[in-house]
Image (cartoon, rainbow, N blue to C red):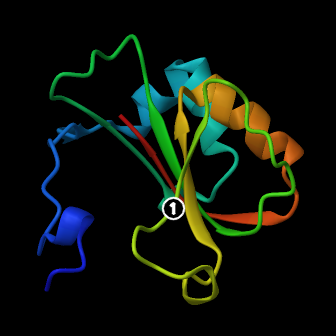
Amino acid sequence: PGIGHAGSDALIGVNLLGEMVPASVRLTCPELHSLAAAASPQQFWARVGGPVLRRRWLTLVVFQGVLSQSNLPALVRLVVPESVQPEESNGIGALFGEPADVLRMLQHERSIHVLRILAF
């Protein structure tokens, strides 16, 4: 209690997810197909629904490790746990952006291990 943003007890977000996209659709979208190859099938989820249009995908890639690049590409954002000391985070973080931008980052980062990829 009280450890969330601005002392709140919980963080409430907008549900951008929606329905799970079948594997056949993932294979027809080049940006999703390439990104899915960066993780095992059990680690890649694609969903469509909410305010995000299917023609413009966004991705959140959860990873463990330490980024070797200190400067992220302009269209990729690093998401880190809030209110957690670095030594307690176990090197967990996430990269957020469009699939092509995040994929380029993953292809150059050898010091992180992808835990999960969510495309929506």
Q: Residue at x 63, y 87 (%)?
A: 87
Q: Residue at x 78, y 58 (%)?
A: 67
* Coordinates of residue 97 in the picture (x, y in percent): 53, 32
Classify 72 as above or below 95.
Answer: above
Residue 14 is drawn in which quadrant? top left
Q: How many marks?
A: 1
Q: Secondary structure at mark 1?
A: loop
Classify 84 as above or below 110.
Answer: below
* Coordinates of residue 112 in the picture (x, y in percent): 76, 64
Identify the image quadrant of the C terminus: top left
Q: Residue at x 85, y 48 (%)?
A: 69
The amino acid marked with disc number 1 is Val
Q: In the displayed structure, does residue 78 sit left or right of residue 74?
A: left
Identify the image quadrant of the N terminus: bottom left
Q: Residue at x 32, y 17 (%)?
A: 54
Is residue 73 shown to the viewer in this render?
A: yes
Classify 85 as above or below 81.
Answer: below
Nearest the eye: 58 or 21: 58
Looking at the image, which residue sits at the far top?
Answer: 55
* Coordinates of residue 5 in the picture (x, y in percent): 25, 63
Is residue 34 shown to the viewer in this render?
A: no
Looking at the image, which residue sits at the far front?
Answer: 6
Q: In the displayed structure, does residue 79 sit left or right of residue 76?
A: left
* Coordinates of residue 29 in the picture (x, y in percent): 52, 20
Q: In the displayed structure, does residue 15 sit left or right of residue 37?
A: left
Label 1 crowd (10 A; few <14 / some 14-19 / many >=20) = some
Q: In the displayed structure, does residue 4 sit left or right of residue 37?
A: left
Residue 90 is drawn in which quadrant? bottom right
Which residue lies under the disc numbered 1? 80
